[in-house]
Amino acid sequence: MQTGSIWNRSVLVTGASRGIGKGIARVFARAGAKVLIVARDGRQSEAAAEEITAAGGLATPFTADVTNADQMREAARTAAARHGGLDVLCANAGIFPQAKLEDMKPELWDEVMSTNLKGMFLSVQACVPYLKKSDQGRIVLTSSITGPITGFPGWTHYGATKAGQLGFMRTASIELAKYGITVNAVLPGNIATEGLQGLGDEYLKTMAAAIPLKRLGDVEDIGNAALFLASKEASYITGQTIVVDGGQTLPESLDALAYQA
Ligand code: NAP
């Protein structure tokens, strides 16, 4: 029988139908948590839940858009009703359509702000009433190295949201401390997701070569960091970030990257 501090806990993961969110859901379910999988495409969420259930975990799909306050309130209510309360929110849903600054349509800017920032805010606000009742209330945000640490052409809007998440986190962690709720963020580097596979092997190899650990991250690398931040053992950590990037942001020059002992 599992005995870790996440065993039997109720966890809501937004954007858990694929990619990093599915990896987070899988890691939590393997540790014995009851996971609500939230995304807009119900069929993909059902498939993710079935995959987790087939592996012996407990996962329930729920269709909601993080930009819709009513739907997120219903998602939080469902997690609490179906899984006996709510202990952890992993606010992970995000989009990253590329557009150069000079060509960017204001509508695209708004869409990225709406999903990545407002969606995170609405997810947190919907879950707080339930997290307050938990003795292990945890919020884990999926930010990125892009924005808080690095930049990439085509992602001014995206980088702004990922840095903005950290500004939100620092004040939210103070406001929610009185309930014993911690708020932290994971900053992934380049993580191998289903979407990335479409870029082709050669491109992925070039990406891996720019990382000191010489591989892209796995979705479960992010899941493991989120699991730690959600654990009892992390109860004194709040308003902080963990970079999970294989050392990608460390080399100060190509010489440093090429260094072999
Ligand atoms: P992904 O594979 O495209 O998955 C995105 C997930 O979010 C899907 O489940 C998607 O499902 C859901 N989603 C998108 N918009 C939503 C909305 N309005 N409401 C509810 N769910 C929504 O992306 P990913 O690469 O796993 O990225 C996940 C998070 O990690 C994002 O916050 C991203 O910024 C961050 N990140 C990713 C990387 C990377 O290398 N992949 C690196 C750094 C940070 P539906 O479309 O069905 O709603």
Image (tube, rainbow, N blue to C red):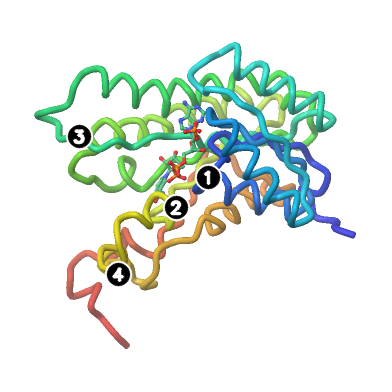
Q: Residues within 10 Å of mark 4 (few under 14, many from 20)?
A: few
Which circle's residue, 1 or 2, is located before the other in the chain? 1
The residue lying toward the viewer, choosing from 205 and 194, is 194
Which x, y percent locates residue 93? 49, 34
166 to the left or right of 106: right
Q: Which residue is mark 2?
A: 194
Secondary structure type for disc 2:
helix
**Mark 1–mark 2 contact, CB under 8 Å?**
yes
Q: Which residue is mark 4?
A: 205
**Does residue 37 sit above or below 188 in this rendering?**
above
220 to the left or right of 112: right
Amino acid bearing label 3? Ala
Which circle's residue, 2 or 3, is located before the other in the chain? 3
x 22%, y 46%: residue: 152
45 to the left or right of 219: right
Amino acid bearing label 4? Lys
Secondary structure type for disc 1:
loop
